[in-house]
Image (cartoon, helix red, strand yellow):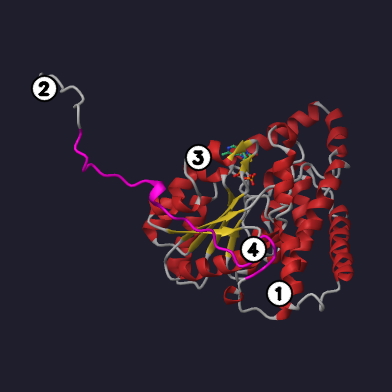
Amino acid sequence: MNEAPRPEPPGSIDPEVGSISQADLTVDTYQVIDADGSYDTERLPDLTEEQFQDLYRWMLLQRTYDERGTKLQRRGRLGTFVSGKGQEGAIVGSGFALQDQDWVFPYGRAAGTLLMHGLSLRDILLYWRGVEDASRMKGANVYGFAISIGSHIPVVTGAGWAMKLDGRDSIAFASLGDGATSTGAFHEGMNFAGVLDVPAVFFCHNNQYAISLPFEKQTAADTVAQKALAYGMDGIRVDGNDVLAVYNAVAEARRRALAGDPVLVEAVTYRRAAHTTSDDPTRYRSDEEVEDWERRDPLERYETFLRDAGFWEGIDEEAIREEVEAEFSAAVDAADAFEERNVEEMFAYIHEEMPPEVRRQYEEYAAFLEDHPEMDDYIEQRPKG
Ligand SMILES: Cc1ncc(C[n+]2csc(CCOP(=O)(O)OP(=O)(O)O)c2C)c(N)n1
């Protein structure tokens, strides 16, 4: 044991003891279209007129999905519903920059990204209806929703690493919220992504809230993008309500990821709807704040751009609205026609063979139902797929 007494804190400390501080960082927010709709021609992506118009259609589909999905839930026809209203620029701009061979690891708010990646609208509705096997995300390179927030980040790193070892020309793409960046899983996954140089893009929708918790109360970091530096990665901060800026940012992040440099992208946006259909946001945020973000609506901003750039004439807005409404209605009909599920499938859908622990749970449940036949009626009343 060292018996020598510790010195008192010195009266003066060497001023040369240095530190780095976030105050020294400049983190710019990349934009192509300003809030008033004016744009920088130098930054316009190299897209065809049809592709510029397509972006509008996708955003309108996302808006329709959010509005009608919320109503469906209110009528008891979905278990719960998570709206991406206000985040259309981030959802669609990022989806447009991906390629079919990429894998998407989604969080619940980004339905449009998944539709653009080939997932059916019917299956997304079935998911929110509580049909377990909709979690399989059939027919698209899409992994199940990360309901446990941030839990998918190490999986994304692992998937990206596998792609790298296989020499594939694809990336692993994660969507996540700002709240997810405060989880342990996020830090671990990001750390290894940086160490292993995996082809992954981590796309954070910074929509200012994690349920009722505002961004400033959740982290002392000024931005999400700067968190990348701690993992030896690059961070990009982009205006998430500017669909073209998001498209450029994710296209660039994807290019770097393929070259072995994973990127964290922060899209600055706002969740205009409630957290889920069981939340009342008026309890924790002001009308003024919501109205302020309504004025930064991603669809209106993009429409102004399309008009100024001369791309609006080719758009029959009424026809597109009818088309996306019809697409949504058809998906609801298809979900309604989905065959009835039996109880076993709730346990059986995820594994090729039921593992012993899951089998034990299933048997317990089946025995419970035998003892309580009245529960059958309750199950009958569950919304069917
Ligand atoms: C690991 C974990 N902790 C807590 C929750 C409960 N929860 C559900 S959503 C949410 C907030 C998510 O916020 P954010 O990641 O910012 O995404 P947003 O919903 O704002 O789009 C929380 C804490 C959860 N699902 N998973």
Amino acid on which disc 4 is placed: Asp
Question: Are the two marked residues, 4 and 1, in contact with CB atoms closer than 8 angstroms?
Answer: no
CA distance for labels 3 and 4: 27 Å
Question: Are the two marked residues, 1 and 3, in contact with CB atoms closer than 8 angstroms?
Answer: no
Q: Secondary structure at mark 2?
A: loop
Q: Which contiguous range is marked in magenta?
A: 13-39
Question: Are the two marked residues, 2 and 1, in contact with CB atoms closer than 8 angstroms?
Answer: no
Q: Position of residue 197 (x, y in %)?
A: 40, 62
Q: Please rate how many residues cluster around mark 1, counting C-alpha atoms within 10 Å: few if below 14, some from 14 to 19, many from 20.
A: some
Q: Please rate how many residues cluster around mark 2, counting C-alpha atoms within 10 Å: few if below 14, some from 14 to 19, many from 20.
A: few
The residue that mark 4 highlights is 34
**Disc number at residue 219?**
3
Q: Secondary structure at mark 3?
A: loop
CA distance for labels 3 and 2: 40 Å
Question: Are the two marked residues, 4 and 2, in contact with CB atoms closer than 8 angstroms?
Answer: no
Which of the two discs, 3 and 4, sits closer to the camera?
4
Q: Position of residue 249 (x, y in %)?
A: 55, 66
The residue drawn where x is 74% and y is 74% is: 308
Q: Is residue 307 depicted above or below 60 in this figure?
A: below
In this orientation, which residue lies closer to the viewer: 55 or 288? 288
In the picture provided, is 296 more to the left or to the right than 313? left
The residue that mark 1 highlights is 52
